Amino acid sequence: MNKLFFTALLVLLFSCDDGDLTIDTIEFNGFELESCDDDNIIDPTETNLLFKINDDDDEYEVLILTLDEDVLTNEAGEQSFEITDDTDTTLTYRIYDDSLDSDYFCDDLTPSTPLVTTEIVASAASITITTILSETESDTYEHFIEITSSTFETDEGERITDLSLDNFGTVYTEI
């Protein structure tokens, strides 16, 4: 009986591994798209940092889309493109150890806290941007950004299988 108890205890001790990080779903629907520009009016001739912060349930997650310069155009239409390891446009998923707000990304000096505990850059993603001339502001274009697919893979080779994101958000450019 003692051998059985000791064996069961050993199996339990060696089968538990709390150090593994498993992320099954990335959920950012319902969270506002933010940028460091007033009212998300950005300069299309510069690289732009766009992000969504999900701080529900004591998890502090951020999805960051870095759009390379000249990706957005002041021209009505739809464009689709792929993010790969070779493009300057990137999609990054991060987990932080505490809550944060847009100031974290927009301050001239990045604060020392909170700390990034996990960062995964998408190895591939499909982005669709639909651009229209604003109906209310004649000198403004509206850019509706959708992430139609993505591939996030950890250093350990684990894939995040579900990016739930119906609509990344809208940014604006002025003529």
Image (spheres, rainbow, N blue to C red):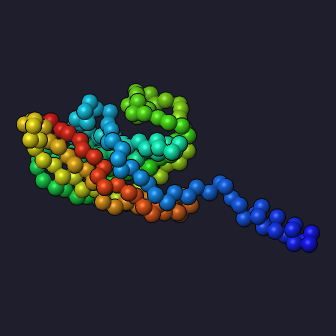
Quadrant of the snapshot with the C terminus: top left
> Residue 121 location in percent, x, y?
44, 52
| Image vertical order of residue 94 relative to residue 154, above or below | above
Quadrant housing residue 122:
bottom left
Quadrant housing residue 69:
top left
Q: Nearer the viewer, residue 17 or 92?
A: 17
Rendered residue at 35%/47% (across/down):
30
Rendered residue at 39%/33% (across/down):
102
Left or right of residue 67, residue 134 in this image = left
**Residue located farthest toward the top when viewing the structure as drawn:** 108
User: Can the viewer see residue 31?
Assistant: yes
User: Can the viewer see residue 116?
Assistant: no
> Residue 51 location in percent, x, y?
36, 42
Quadrant of the snapshot with the N terminus: bottom right
Rendered residue at 42%/52% (across/down):
27
Rendered residue at 49%/42% (across/down):
60
| Image vertical order of residue 93 relative to residue 3, above or below | above
